[in-house]
Amino acid sequence: MLICAGNGESFVGAVPMGVGLIEMSINLTRLCLFDPPAYLLFVGSAGSYGDHEIFDLVESKSAANIELSFLLNSSYTPLDNIIKTTTEQEVIVNSSNYITTDKELASKFLPLGIGLENMEFFAFLRVAQEFDIPAGGLFCVTNYCHVDAHAEFVGNSARAKKLLEDRLL
């Protein structure tokens, strides 16, 4: 089953589940409780922390939920904040309800093996993990994580959507 965030980021054949960690968690849990799919594939945009170029298509089965304050040694969590559903070395996609706009902080994710940012993917994988449903993600890079991230996303989202839909077909 194809899943997307919705709210302006929808794809042909994909079911929108909501923007951010909370909406994705609630709506995908509801779907898995009442009609569990055999496989889940998340499709969406991503911001690059610096190693991926605009319009790169990236697949991943690994996600993190690391806030910027953690990188600044200003916070900690007792929760498991990385999900790896494969033993292969691959790009980890970080999720937060906030978009990174500080290029210097964004670069601190790279040594941790975290290359992309997408608001929903950690919640998506965590719900799939809870219901023991194989899952993965397909992302198109729309922007770099820097001060102009939003404007870059807006300017590139139509082409990214077309690239993702072409790949899915």
Image (tube, helix red, strand yellow):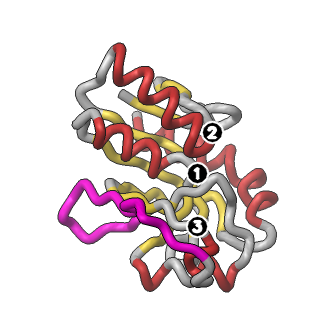
**Amino acid, disc 2:** Val
Location of residue 34 with respect to 42 vertically, above or below:
above
Location of residue 46 with respect to 30 vertically, above or below:
below
Give percent across and percent down for residue 104.
Answer: 67, 85
**CA separation, marks 1 and 3?**
12 Å
Quadrant in which the N terminus appears? top left
Q: Could you tell whether 76 is left or right of 149 in the image?
A: left
**Amino acid, disc 3:** Glu
Q: Which badge, 2 or 3, is on the more N-terminal residue? A: 2
Give percent across and percent down for residue 46.
Answer: 57, 57
Determine crowd level at label 1: few under 14, some 14-19, many 20+ residues with C-alpha closer than 10 A: many
The answer to which image quadrant residue 8 occupies is: top right
Residue 121 lies in the magenta stretch? no
| Residue at the left extreme, as displayed | 87
Q: Nearer the viewer, residue 145 or 32?
A: 32
Asked if residue 12 can be seen in this view, the reply is no
**Residue that carries the numbered disc 3 in the rendered image:** 67
Give percent across and percent down for residue 81.
Answer: 41, 62
**CA separation, marks 2 and 3?**
17 Å
Q: Which residues are magenta?
A: 75-92
Observer-side mark, 2 or 3, equals 3
**Amino acid, disc 1:** Met
Give percent across and percent down for residue 25.
Answer: 49, 36
Name the residue rendered at 23%, 27% in the picture. Answer: 38
**Residue that carries the numbered disc 2 in the rendered image:** 19
**Residue that carries the numbered disc 1 in the rendered image:** 119
- Label 3: element kind: loop
Q: Nearer the viewer, residue 153 or 126?
A: 126
